[in-house]
Amino acid sequence: AQKVTQAQTEISVVEKEDVTLDCVYETRDTTYYLFWYKQPPSGELVFLIRRNSFDEQNEISGRYSWNFQKSTSSFNFTITASQVVDSAVYFCALSEGEGANNLFFGTGTRLTVIP
Amino acid sequence: NAGVTQTPKFRVLKTGQSMTLLCAQDMNHEYMYWYRQDPGMGLRLIHYSVGEGTTAKGEVPDGYNVSRLKKQNFLLGLESAAPSQTSVYFCASSYSPGQGPTYEQYFGPGTRLTVT
């Protein structure tokens, strides 16, 4: 079974629109970590955020915000006032237990921001 | 501080040939990882290492071998390449719990491998 589901394969928005990327995870562990990574067209993977299972506080970093809800096993990512530079593939990932030995990645959401 | 580097960036192999991908990190990370990325499938873990001299299998280890002779290097070997191994390979590294303030994984730029 897929541990991390990103149901949105591709999303297109017009510049300055807000967009939310969905992530649903599945785990039986009580200790786990959730991550978001960005993969721009150049191909590298850029770390965006890490959240542990005991911290449900939402986080905001500039135009980025994350909504972690254990009740729905979701860790959604919102970009406010999107820009062309936000165009990339975004991956949600899960690691279970301490140690982050194994990251289970979702299949990614390709975001295209149209100028 | 180069972070995580991978060599080579691109490679084309014929079926049955062998090769080694090199990953190096200069962040003193204990943990290192090899992933492959295929279209529509996200990244999947091939092998990982929690320290010098140790390796372990990940989700898709078949057809690959690894070695971690030095803390800063993690080698991925393909003994007899197959077309199914055509992929983009990413190396990553991270602190171990207690070694550093956080242990998110830092990724290299990737190696694009084509097996014909």
Image (cartoon, coloured by chain):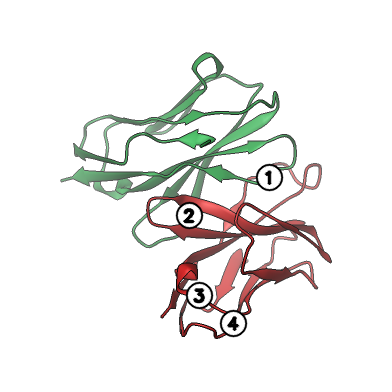
- Which numbered tag is attached to residue B82? 3
Report, in whole angstroms, how far the alpha carbon at label 2 lies from the one at label 3.
26 Å
> From the viewer's perspective, is B100 left or right of A71?
right
Task: Give the quadrant of residue B112.
Answer: bottom left
- Farthest residue in the top direction? A71
Question: Which image quarter is the N terminus of chain B in?
Answer: bottom right
Quick check: marks 3 and 1 in contact, CB under 8 Å? no
Report, in whole angstroms, how far the alpha carbon at label 3 lies from the one at label 1.
34 Å
- Which numbered tag is attached to residue A45? 2
Residue at disc 2, secondary structure: loop
Q: Colour of chain A?
A: green
Question: Which one of the lettered chains is coloured red?
Answer: B
Q: Position of residue B88 (x, y in %)?
A: 46, 65
- Which is closer to the viewer, label 4 or label 3? 3
The residue lying at 80 percent from left, 47 percent from top is: B99
- Which is closer to the viewer, label 3 or label 1? 3
Q: Give the labeled residue for mark 1.
A: B103
Q: Earlier in the sequence, mark 3 or mark 1?
A: 3
The residue lying at 44 percent from left, 31 percent from top is: A23
Report, in whole angstroms, how far the alpha carbon at label 2 lies from the one at label 4.
24 Å
The residue lying at 60 percent from left, 45 percent from top is: A103
Question: Which image quarter is the C terminus of chain B in?
Answer: bottom left
Question: Is residue A93 visible to the viewer in this orientation of the structure?
Answer: yes
